[in-house]
Image: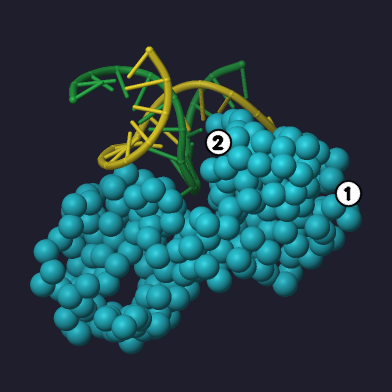
Chain colours: A cyan, B yellow, C green
DNA sequence: CACGAGACCTGTTCGC
DNA sequence: TGCGAACAGGTCTCGT
């Protein structure tokens, strides 16, 4: 599920709350539960879980696909991986299947991490960089310019799609948005990165920002049983559209494997 | 350095 | 209808 737009949407909802639940900024933690031990990333934080009690959530944000909860003297970091989801419900509500971890607040609500496939991870750390340090720039970062992006591409010989999925190069793009961005930029997913001109790199960066922004404006994408609430899945131009006509030229969209990932593109428009 | 395979997991969908 | 295979929004590690 969660690529940058989905994580951004979740962070915003948790920060601001909704009609039925309050925002979490300012809420004091009084207890926590871990029901699948591997959900807590190594190394096990010193004093966990007692140290969480009494801490207040001061801010909620995102870096790449990581959710960040700034506490009084530590940061709680959560990565949803493939099937993770967050929800806020009253403490007395019975746990659901696949609830792996939750925080209980004095206000009577709890923040629950639900994760069917158990790939998701939670960190509690005083040193965020130990978790986030290897991430490349955020796609929306002002420090990421057409020129620096072009330098990232020309500095290596690699198929462009796996490169876009490499979080150490640029942080936040996943399988859906990579396919959508490459289509909009007219670039074949297997094209080698160093063959992309400066002009085309600028177009690709603009396409990446455009699809991520569209995703955010639509509250992310919901597919199958994973993630709900988003609407971007109705605006896919190539993803999950194998055999359907390309919106530009009508050619049937093709699906292949690139770097072990399902990859959708128009064989005529993308070169 | 770049790539592929395998691992980590469960649930859903596909193909025979 | 049933059953195993294939596949899924992600990332890490290992071997070549």
On screen, C9 above or below A130?
above
Depth check, front residue: A41 or A141? A141
Left/right of residue A266 with respect to residue A167 in the rendered view: right
Residue A43 disc label? none
Mark 1 vs mark 2, CA separation in Å:
25 Å
Q: Which residue is mark 2?
A: A261
The x and y percentages for residue A136 are 64, 57
- Residue A159 visible here: no
Tag 1, which secondary structure? loop
Q: SS for tag 2?
A: strand
Q: Residue at horizontal 67%, vertical 36%?
A: A252
Image coords of residue A145 (percent x, y): 79, 65
| Res. A210 image quadrant | bottom right
Q: Label 2 neighbourhood size at 10 Å, few (<14), some (14-19), many (20+)?
A: few
- The image shows a total of numbered marks equal to 2
Q: Left or right: where does residue A37 sit relative to residue C15?
A: left
């Amino acid at each position: 599920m969660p690529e940058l737009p989905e994580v951004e949407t979740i962070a915003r909802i948790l920060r601001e709350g909704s009609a039925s639940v309050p925002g979490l900024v300012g809420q004091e933690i009084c207890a926590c539960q871990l029901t699948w031990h591997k959900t807590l990333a190594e190394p096990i934080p010193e004093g966990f879980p007692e140290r969480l009690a009494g801490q207040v959530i001061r801010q909620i944000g995102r870096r790449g696909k990581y959710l960040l909860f700034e506490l009084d003297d530590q940061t709680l970091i959560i990565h949803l991986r493939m099937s993770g989801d967050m929800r806020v419900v009253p403490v007395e509500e019975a746990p659901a299947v696949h609830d792996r971890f939750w925080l209980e607040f004095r206000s009577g609500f709890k923040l629950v991490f639900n994760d069917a496939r158990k790939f998701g991870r939670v960190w509690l750390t005083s040193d965020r960089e130990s978790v986030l340090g290897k991430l490349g720039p955020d796609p929306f970062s002002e420090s990421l310019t057409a020129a620096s992006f072009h330098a990232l591409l020309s500095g290596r010989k690699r198929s462009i799609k796996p490169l876009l999925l490499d979080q150490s190069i640029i942080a936040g793009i996943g399988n859906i948005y990579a396919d959508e961005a490459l289509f909009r930029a007219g670039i074949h997913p297997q094209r080698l990165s160093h063959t992309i001109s400066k002009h085309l790199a600028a177009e690709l960066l603009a396409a990446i920002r455009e699809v991520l922004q569209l995703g955010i404006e639509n509250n992310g994408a919901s597919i199958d049983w994973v993630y709900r609430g988003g609407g971007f899945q109705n605006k896919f131009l190539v993803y999950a559209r194998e055999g359907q006509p390309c919106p530009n030229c009508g050619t049937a969209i093709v699906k292949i494997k690139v770097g072990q990932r399902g990859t959708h593109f128009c064989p005529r428009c993308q070169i």
